[in-house]
Amino acid sequence: MTILIDRHSDQNGDEIVEKNQGNVKEEETELVLDAAFEAPHTNSFGHTFRDYDAESERRRGVEEFYRVNHIGQTVDFVRKMREEYRKLNRTEMSIWECCELLNEFIDESDPDLDEPQIEHLLQTAEAIRKDYPDEDWLHLTGLIHDLGKVLLHPSFGELPQWAVVGDTFPVGCAFDESIVHHKYFKENPDYDNLSYNTKYGIYTEDCGLDNVLMSWGHDDYMYLVAKENQTTLPSAGLFIIRYHSFYALHKSEAYKHLMNNEDRENMNWLKVFNKYDLYSKSKVRINVEDVKPYYLSLINKYFPAKLKW
């Protein structure tokens, strides 16, 4: 099934540094990949990864995406979306069916890749599987981390891209300057709201990220789907799903004052995951039918046969 994408939507659319090392100090967050993984120096367009200023066919579109995104992601909007979508009353389908639903979707916010999403999901999962063969939950997390992008599909409300993809960030507190294209937040209604534009805003120190409203999109939606369908993935898996696009935190270390101890432990696994999520993007194709039986076995292990979405 093809996902139809509106390329002109506006804001009115609505654990462990290395495996088995145990706990680490908070400052020891720079993780070293196993030698088997060789990160490429350039992305699919010949530029460094996450270079939002490099001249390319996608740069202008990516910047316009973030302009609209930063204006539309408000506290009121996020609360409305969470209330609506946590009902999980859209459909029932399996994890693999959802993977297939994304087969022809391309993320407009991504400056590094223009391949269908199922390619990225399998590239991420297989790269992790190669270096961490005993962490099957992490393999599955790699496969499903982006499935929330079904929000673009008509059956899920056909939300505009700015409300589904892109880097995520907290709302209800000041927008950190490390967020890509920060300048556009000046047009966000919450930018001058005294209740929302301070360091802590509506939150408290060490409150825990689970108590923080994140900008609405596929990360938060898939987190809700997995949690409400009672997945047996470890907490680190759910953490990765919800915060893998939270680059202001895991690349710039912004918003650490909102994290609790569990967040800090799970952050180590997110830093492992993020390297694969970002640097596994390539033109190398994965034979879906060859790897499908393995991932179906993991889905059966950690999820019910059918999920409510």
Image (cartoon, helix red, strand yellow):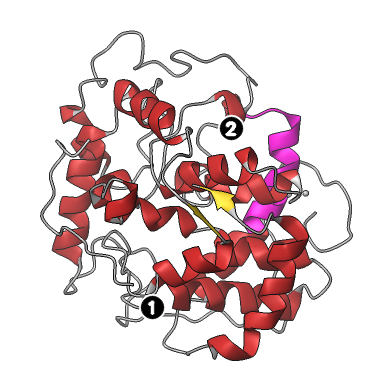
Closer to the N terminus: mark 1 or mark 2? Answer: 1
Instruction: Name above or below for residue 47 compared with residue 14.
Output: below
Residue 26 appears in which quarter of the rendering?
top right
Residue 264: say if magenta. Answer: yes
Determine whether the residue tagged by mark 2 lies in a helix, strand or loop: helix
Mark 1, other Cα within 10 Å: few <14 / some 14–19 / many ≥20: many
x and y, in percent, of residue 271 in the image: 63, 56
- In front here: 226 or 281? 226
Q: Which circle marks residue 256 in the picture?
A: 2
- Could you tell me which residue is drawn at 13 percent across and 49 percent down? 9
Residue 276 appears in which quarter of the rendering?
bottom right
Mark 2, other Cα within 10 Å: few <14 / some 14–19 / many ≥20: some
- Could you tell me which residue is drawn at 74 percent across and 57 percent down? 302
Q: CA distance from mark 1 to mark 2?
A: 29 Å
Question: Residue 127: in sight, yes or no?
Answer: yes
Q: Which residues are magenta?
A: 259-271
x and y, in percent, of residue 167 in the image: 39, 49
Residue 21 appears in which quarter of the rendering?
bottom right
- In front here: 91 or 114? 91
- Main secondary structure type of the part rendered in magenta: helix
- Which quarter of the figure is the N terminus placed in? bottom left
Residue 215: say if magenta. Answer: no
- Could you tell me which residue is drawn at 34 percent across and 22 percent down? 75
Instruction: Name above or below for residue 133 compared with residue 61.
Output: below
x and y, in percent, of residue 139 in the image: 69, 68
Question: Residue 37: in sight, yes or no?
Answer: no
Identify residue type, mark 1.
Answer: Asn
Is mark 1 in CB contact (under 8 Å) with mark 2? no
Q: Which circle marks residue 43 in the picture?
A: 1
Identify residue type, mark 2.
Answer: Lys
How many circles with numbers are drawn on the protein? Answer: 2
> Is 283 displayed left or right of 307 in the figure?
left
